[in-house]
Amino acid sequence: MKIIFTFFFTILFSIFVDAQTSQDYAVMIQATVNESPATVTLKFNKIATTKQFRIYRKTKAANNWGNAIATLPSTATQYIDNAVTLGNAYEYNITRYDNAAVAYGYIYVGIKLPETTYRGKLLLMVDANYSSPLSTEIAQLQKDLIADGWQVKRFDINRNTTVTAVKLLIKNEVTADVNTKALYLLGRVPVPYSGGFKAATGFMYPPDGHPDHAGAWPADIYYGCFNESFWTDNSVNDTTASRTNNRNIPGDGKFDEMYILGYDSVKLQIGRVDLTNMTQFGMSDTLLVKQYLNKAHAFKTGQLATVRRGLVDDNFGPMGGEAFASTGWRDFSTMFGDSVFNRDYLTSIKKGNYLFTYGCGAGSYTTCSGIGASSDFNNDSINSVFTMLFGSYFGDWDSPNNFLRAPLCSRPASLASVWSGRPHWQFHHMSLGETIGYSTWLTQNNYYDTTSGVIGYTYNIYPTFTHVSLMGDPSLRLHAMKPVASIKSLAATDSLSVRISWTPSTDATDGYVILTSRSLNGRFIVVGKALSTDTVFVHTAPGYGINYYSVRPLKLENTPSGTYYNLALGVIDSAYSKNRMGVYDLAKTTLNASVYPNPNNGNFTVFVNENSSQQAIINCYDMTGKLLKQIATNQFATDVNLNGIKGLILVRIIQGNMEITKKVLLLE
């Protein structure tokens, strides 16, 4: 890794030392867009000492900014880009050169960016302690994830499972399905630790700068990095930390690494909701997680009132150029334009509503000077959904009554919290509908290597280090909408079509998107769109058997980063179509599967003969279309028990894009 740490310190305490505020290190950008002709106008701030601006542009996926597309004088306050097209998005970097500092700003701009209907597969790792008491809330979480375009694969994990065993489950899923994009750790899923002093490099690893806090910190990033030879446990021998969990010696199960290898080393969007050992809140971790899941559902379905504005409470200042709070100024301008305020943190969010906030100050495990204490979040007046916090000690989140996790324990609104300052976080893609999990992935992979040509985003100390973690649901998005109130799908008597009707969303919409899937947890594809005044859609080519339908309100969001089509969560219903019924096996495709014996007494075996590690879904229906049983399996042979049922049934087996339906006769 070609990051030279002496470079950081030399620069930080020389050319940056004269800046007056953290805001001086942020170029605050907002965009306006036109459709015809297609143009992007970037507006940005300057300070009195500005000498020059340089504008860069790249695609979202590119890992290098390339050469500047424009150089502007110190008097400039905007830049117009005419080389843009409708339906596309562009990422800009504006670098401001001053007498006192170099400042950076980033914005992701789109003009009618199309809606995202499929987000990939999300692995949901559930603390097994919650499987029974939180079954209703976890089922709602899975339903909401599916309704937002995710496919969900759930694992219930015992707390005494090793981190390596959990990692193997995750790695196998990623290997089997390239669409696996996100990892949601719900509860006390085993916590990896990594980091510490290495004599070979002479570099100590307390990201907050305190020698008594050196050693291994929690490192959920481990679950998303799959080069196993990288994760060693033999070279760090560091017992200087005052907190026992941070001490790291060879063979103790804590890893040696301080930072990941390089660009795109993290493959998953990872978030965790772990509220164990938060005793100040007077509830068990089970009840705290239940409360979190309920308020997350309320936010995702537009039931929580939010105000699109940001707040920055900076109790550090520029700090020799690290300018921790510059992240807030930089990101919030792309989200809220001019609605970004420099105000006291707790006083303000108790009196008013802020969608995203930033606060920093000298800290302990449970406090942040000028911001508050963990106990301050134990009330009904915490009106910030997304939070960035920074200060000493509490970035090590796996500590009792930890301040970084405290917002997640609050009753009203807080759903996400990150330790932003070392390093800076990158949230600007959320303005156009990306998830906070994507921002986490981007921040964890923020890499700067002039040798290889990979140049990412501004950073100070500790870019790509293993402590970077998201406390919260990784699927969260910035802009929530109310879904339709209800949906009904009904197959026509001739089974050649399905009529889908719905009660409209109470939010203003620009229409509705209708999607279908052959399984509830399958990939939903668009079959049509409807006007905002419509409440009915007819699907004229349903597949044989069960068809699942999702209706999602659509709205063109106009943000300080341009315009994009936003989707509410879908509401899902199913209809049974007898279309294409024949005398022989139905809906036969290339899937090679069989049922034996047939006829049988209600006990039979389904054989999936394809050479594939992909999960198969077995659905058993009676002849009216009622679902009798559903089984998910990765096995070649799966036993099915339908005792007490007799007569002709249909057994539909689905694996990926392949399926087959068998008639099976159940005898007395």
Image (cartoon, grey):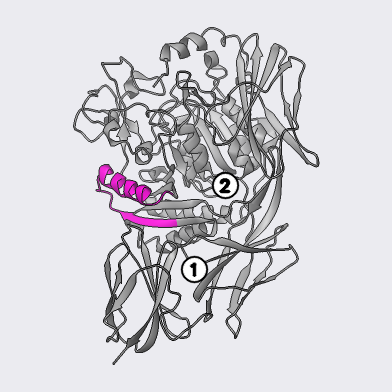
Looking at the figure, which quarter contains the C terminus?
bottom left
- The residue positioned 59% from the left and 33% from the top of the image is 345
Q: Can you give x and y, in whole percent of width and height, for residue 232 in the image?
A: 25, 31
Q: Can you give x and y, in whole percent of width and height, for residue 466 in the image?
A: 38, 31
Q: Is residue 252 above or below residue 97?
A: below
Residue 164 lies in the magenta stretch: yes
Q: Label 2: how many residues lie within 10 Å, few (<14), some (14-19) or many (20+)? A: some
Looking at the figure, which quarter contains the N terminus?
top left
Specify start and end residues of the magenta stretch as a single range: 152-178
Q: Nearer the viewer, residue 312 or 66?
A: 66
Residue 466 in sight: yes
Q: Nearer the viewer, residue 309 or 223?
A: 223
Looking at the rendered structure, the kind of residue marked 2 is Arg
- The residue positioned 50% from the left and 26% from the top of the image is 421
**Which residue in the structure is indicated by mark 2?**
477
Q: Residue furthest bottom?
A: 668
| Residue 116 falls left or right of residue 389 | right
Residue 134 lies in the magenta stretch: no
Q: Nearer the viewer, residue 4 or 163?
A: 4
Q: Quadrant of residue 359?
A: top right
Looking at the rendered structure, the kind of residue marked 1 is Arg
- The residue positioned 42% from the left and 11% from the top of the image is 6
Q: Residue 268, which numbered label?
A: none
Circle 1: element type: loop
**Which residue in the structure is indicated by mark 1?**
518
Q: Can you give x and y, in whole percent of width and height, for residue 522 in the image?
A: 47, 62
- The residue positioned 33% from the left and 71% from the top of the image is 593
Q: Quadrant of residue 298?
A: bottom right
